[in-house]
């Protein structure tokens, strides 16, 4: 890993951690496209999975009281199945093909979520939860972005932002462990080769981002944060799709 690549990864990690603290997601959405470009599809996504776990673990104590544990159990249980399936598919498909498929699926889900209204769909039905969890786990393992699938579900059902952001933290810990564990089991050499002290720098970058995100929360409303979530989800999905298309064309 060159110095330039290392610095870029640290900077985008700070921004991703800040977004994660503010909106409940955003780390992988912002970090994954750059990681994929700099480190390759498999190593980049695996690193995103691991750093995402660390970010969510550090945020978890701050949002514990707002977690919807019933929602978490449904989403997480099905996400583990999706992550196992995604890790297996990741060994069979080219990284660019995975990126195109994930980006297209997520954009479609977000587009459909904008069509429906909260009067017709609520958070009570269990089947949409299962589908959201399965899709999120699958996309997290394939491209390191599990947030857009649950974002589409949150928009579709008008899930309250505070509960949504809090519940995603233990959820991302579970999906991250499932995705990273499955990938390391199938390919133990998947992690990028870097010095031990660089991991300490990455930890400091995540802590700095979380602290910055907490300060920014004082100046924004839940509605603004929800809009930020939607923009992040669309941007992350579009970046993943474009990255894959560029790779295929080249």
Image (cartoon, rainbow, N blue to C red):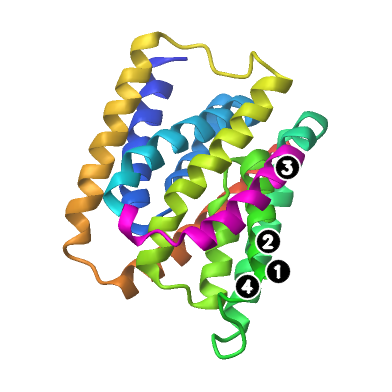
Circle 1 sits in a helix, a strand or a loop, which is it? helix
- Going 70% across and 69% down the picture, which residue do you hit? 127
Q: Is residue 227 visible?
A: yes
Q: CA distance from mark 3 to mark 1?
A: 25 Å
Circle 4 sits in a helix, a strand or a loop, which is it? helix
Q: Which mark is residue 98?
A: 3
Residue indicated by mark 4? 111
Vertical relation: 74 (above or below) 196: below
Judged left or right of residue 116, residue 223 is left
Residue indicated by mark 1? 127
Query: Where is residue 130 drawn, in percent x and y?
Result: 68, 61
Tell me the magenta residue range.
64-86
Dot 4, how many residues are within 10 Å of its Cα: few (below 14), some (14-19), or many (20+)?
some
Q: CA distance from mark 2 to mark 4?
A: 19 Å
Query: Where is residue 67 drawn, in percent x and y?
Result: 40, 58
Vertical relation: 32 (above or below) 234: above
Among numbered discs 4 and 1, the one appearing first in the sequence: 4
């Amino acid at each position: 890993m060159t110095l330039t690549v290392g610095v870029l990864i640290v900077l985008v990690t700070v921004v991703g951690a800040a977004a994660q603290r503010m909106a409940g997601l955003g780390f992988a959405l912002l970090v994954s496209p750059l990681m994929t470009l700099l480190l390759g599809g498999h190593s980049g996504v695996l690193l995103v999975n691991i750093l995402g776990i660390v970010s969510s673990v550090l945020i978890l104590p701050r949002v514990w009281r707002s977690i919807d544990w019933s929602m978490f159990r449904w989403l997480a249980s099905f996400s583990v199945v999706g992550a196992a399936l995604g890790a297996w598919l990741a060994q069979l498909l080219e990284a660019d093909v995975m990126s195109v498929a994930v980006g297209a699926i997520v954009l479609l889900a977000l587009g459909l979520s904008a069509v429906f209204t909260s009067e017709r769909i609520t958070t009570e039905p269990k089947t949409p939860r299962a589908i959201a969890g399965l899709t999120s786990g699958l996309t997290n393992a394939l491209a390191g972005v599990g947030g857009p699938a649950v974002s589409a579900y949150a928009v579709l059902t008008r899930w309250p932002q505070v509960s949504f952001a809090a519940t995603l933290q233990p959820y991302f810990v579970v999906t991250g462990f499932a995705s990273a564990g499955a990938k390391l089991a199938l390919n133990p050499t998947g992690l990028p080769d870097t010095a031990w002290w660089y991991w300490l720098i990455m930890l400091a970058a995540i802590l700095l981002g979380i602290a910055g995100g907490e300060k920014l929360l004082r100046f924004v409303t839940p509605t603004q944060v929800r809009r930020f979530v939607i923009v992040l989800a669309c941007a992350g999905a579009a970046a993943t799709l474009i990255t894959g298309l560029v790779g295929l064309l080249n």
